[in-house]
Amino acid sequence: MIFIQRLKKSFGDNKVLKGIDLEIEKGQVVVLIGPSGSGKTTFLRCLNVLEVPDEGKIAIGGQTMDFSKKVHPKAIAEFRRLTGMVFQGYNLFPHMTSLGNVMEGPVTVKKESREEAAAKAEYFLAKVGLGDKLEAYPFQLSGGQQQRVGIARALAMEPNVMLFDEPTSALDPELVGDVLKVMKDLAEEGMTMIVVTHEMRFAREVADKVIFMDGGVIVESGAPDKLFTKPEKERTKQFLSMIQ
């Protein structure tokens, strides 16, 4: 499903990604962990081409982007449709209802009819447990509900892969569970997911593979039971000892 080769990204003199190689199978849930500044968010943003990598290749679902050559903006826009991104902040349009927020992408980007997009938006809002909040505006929703609208909005674009960038870090603790439940349900349905999170319990319970990043490289990766209980690299052991 996803093939990443020699992915590099710098901001000025700061080399944030120093050559990432990774393969992810269809239906896998991959969780990225690591200290702040390790490159996790930049990696996700490169997969979504919100940040254009300096070098490397990304292939998703048979489509490949080679960043060793100049990439046309139209090609980036097409490639971006393959991934749905859920951010740390909710980024909802404040002047639109839940229904309007979820409809916007299918109507403006995919040129779907408003009737078709509305039906799809209702379906995905019900899927994330917000079937009774179709006409609610963001200010009328809790943080957890807003984040679930954000998940529905990404799903409505029918992506091959869902990318989650610390989706619960801005939430009050009692609201985290609702968002994680939606993500667990998606995983059980076979959605391919890459998740940056500090929720280690989620990583243990849901991930097929956990990747520990530090200093812009993948230090170690493996099944959660192995990586959390018997890490091989000293840096991984040091990090886990601080958070467990």
Image (cartoon, rainbow, N blue to C red):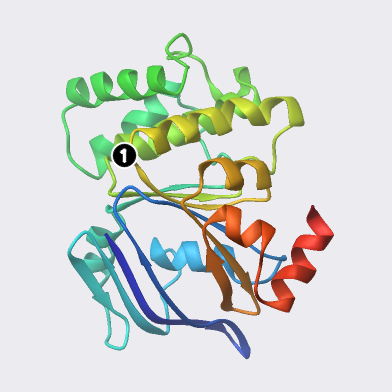
Q: Is residue 100 visible?
A: yes
Amino acid under label 1? Gly
Task: Examine the rendered structure and indicate whether residue 111 appears above or below residue 36.
Answer: above
Name the residue at 79% across, 70% down: 238
Q: Is residue 140 left or right of residue 163?
A: right
**Residue 162 on image: x %, y %:** 39, 47
For this orientation, the residue located farthest to the right is 242
Q: Is residue 120 left or right of residue 234?
A: left
Q: Is residue 177 left or right of residue 102?
A: right
For this orientation, the residue located farthest to the top is 132
**Residue 210 on image: x %, y %:** 54, 58
**Residue 180 on image: x %, y %:** 57, 33
Question: Which quadrant holds the N terminus?
Answer: bottom left
Q: Within 10 Å of the Cα at label 1, are there few (<14), some (14-19), or many (20+) other Cα atoms?
A: some
Which residue was labeled with disc 1?
A: 105
Helix, strand, or loop for circle 1?
Answer: helix
For this orientation, the residue located farthest to the bottom is 13
**Residue 223 on image: x %, y %:** 52, 57
Front one among 194 and 98: 194
How many dots with numbers? 1
Name the residue at 34% across, 33% down: 189
Front one among 145 and 190: 190
State which quadrant residue 119 falls in.
Answer: top left
Task: Examine the rendered structure and indicate whether residue 6 appears above or below residue 171.
Answer: below
Name the residue at 24% across, 27% down: 117
Name the residue at 57% across, 24% down: 145
